[in-house]
Amino acid sequence: MIILDIVSEELIPDVKAKEFLESREKETELKYEQKNSLEILRKFVKLDAAKSDELAAELKKIERLRDRQIFAVVNFLPEDKDDLRAVLHKDYSSLTNEEIDAVLSAVKKHS
C-alpha cells in the first residue's frame, strides 16, 4: 500500500484544471476519473486562461471576496443577482449592493 503525503494545496479555477488535464493527456493515458473530469470541464469551461486570470484579478480588488468565492464566480460566471446568490450561498449576504454590482459588472466585462 502506497501512502501519499499532501505537500501543498491551492485553489485553481476550472480552466487551469482543464489545461492541466489536457497537458497530462498528451503525456500519458488518463485514469477513469481524470477522463470524466476533463470531459465535464471541456463542456462547461467558458473562459480561456487569460480571461479567467483577468476576471480573478479584478474580483480580488473586492476586499470581502476570498479566493474560494472568487474562483466560484470565475467558474460559474453568474449573470444576475440570483445566479450570484446561488454561487456564493451564505456569503452573498455579507456583500454590499455595490460589491454585488461590481462582481456582476466584472463578469459581464470579461465573459
Image (tube, rainbow, N blue to C red):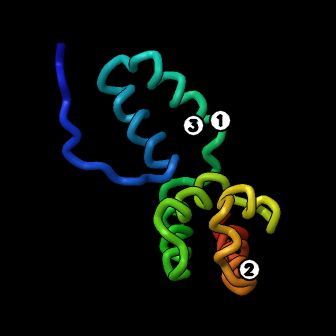
Comparing 92 with 39, the one in front is 92
Residue 24 higher or lower than 63, as above or below: above
* Amino acid at circle 2: Asp
* Amino acid at circle 3: Leu
* Percent x, y of residue 68: 50, 60
Mark 2 or 3: the one toward you: 2
Q: Residue 41, which numbered label?
A: 3
Mark 1 or 2: the one toward you: 2
Asked if the residue under mark 3 is in contact with the one under mark 1, i.e. CB atoms within 8 Å, the reply is yes
Q: Residues within 10 Å of mark 2 (few under 14, many from 20)?
A: some
Q: Residue 101, which numbered label?
A: 2
* Percent x, y of residue 75: 59, 53
Quadrant where the C terminus is found in the figure = bottom right
Q: Which residue position holds label 1? A: 43
Q: Residue furthest bottom?
A: 98
* Percent x, y of residue 56: 51, 68
Question: Which residue is painted at 41% across and 53% down in the image?
Answer: 11
**Mark-to-mark CA distance, 2 and 3:** 27 Å
**Mark-to-mark CA distance, 1 and 3:** 5 Å
Comparing 7 with 76, the one in front is 7
Tell me: 111 left or right of 65: right
Residue 26 higher or lower than 75, as above or below: above
Task: Give the structural element (helix, strand or loop) at label 3.
Answer: helix
| Residue 59 found in image quarter | bottom right
Asked if the residue under mark 3 is in contact with the one under mark 2, i.e. CB atoms within 8 Å, the reply is no
* Percent x, y of residue 28: 31, 20
Quadrant where the N terminus is found in the figure = top left
Q: Residues within 10 Å of mark 3 (few under 14, many from 20)?
A: some
